Image (cartoon, rainbow, N blue to C red):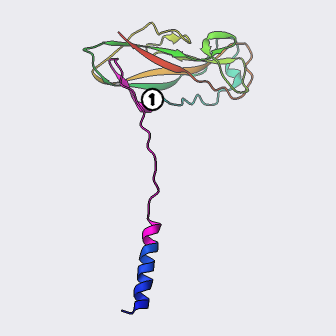
Amino acid sequence: MSFKKLAVIAAFSAVSAAAFAANPGVITFKGEIVTGACGISGDTLNQTVNLGQVPANTFKAAGDRSEVVNFPIILTDCDTTTQKNAKFTFTGAAADANAELFGTTGSASGVGIRLQAPSGEILKNGTEQSSNFVLSNGNNTVMFGAMYESTAAKVTPGVADSVANFTVAYY
């Protein structure tokens, strides 16, 4: 093999190795060790619930509601030797005309968001649910419902988004 061919092969090998060199990256780990009976699945800890497109004519009077859209909160690794029941509290900015509802941002008006517990109990913004969710050992899926609720006889169409935080108390 000639020196010239050997030099070309060596140069090609150096370029190929450089082309496959990896750039450094960063991984951030987040979590928390809790004293409660259960953890909360990362899949449901931060989620988006799509309430869809609801016609404004669905709301004819204050208190009218859209169809319920269910969403889960998954409690993980529950141990009922510590506590046997859970209760949830949802909090967020209140609707202007009804503090029990979650206020919306966007161009829609005359509407807020109402939540419903698995038992069917209608939840109030900032108030712990009155019904217990009975825990089982292991993972527990707790299904809540969300819906639009009118605060006036006339609802103005537009975007109606909201955010709610939740806490879980164990008994």
Q: Residue at x 44, y 72 (%)?
A: 16
Q: Position of residue 120 (x, y in %)?
A: 47, 13
Q: Residue at x 47, y 67 (%)?
A: 19
Q: Which residue, as the protein is rendered here, is positioned at the far left?
A: 81
Residue 37 shown left or right of residue 23 in the figure: left
Give the image quarter of residue 141.
Answer: top left
Query: Which of the pair 43/109 is nearer the observer?
Result: 43
Q: Main secondary structure of the magenta part?
A: loop
Residue at which label 1 appears: 44
Q: Residue at x 39, y 10 (%)?
A: 132
Give, as a three-letter code, the residue at label 1. Answer: Thr
Q: Position of residue 130 (x, y in %)?
A: 45, 6
* Start-end of magenta stretch: 16-43
Q: Is residue 39 magenta?
A: yes
Callout 1 secondary element: helix
Query: Which of the pair 134/43 is nearer the observer?
Result: 43
Q: Residue at x 34, y 12 (%)?
A: 85
Q: Position of residue 23 (x, y in %)?
A: 47, 56
Q: Is residue 37 magenta?
A: yes
Above or below 144: residue 25: below
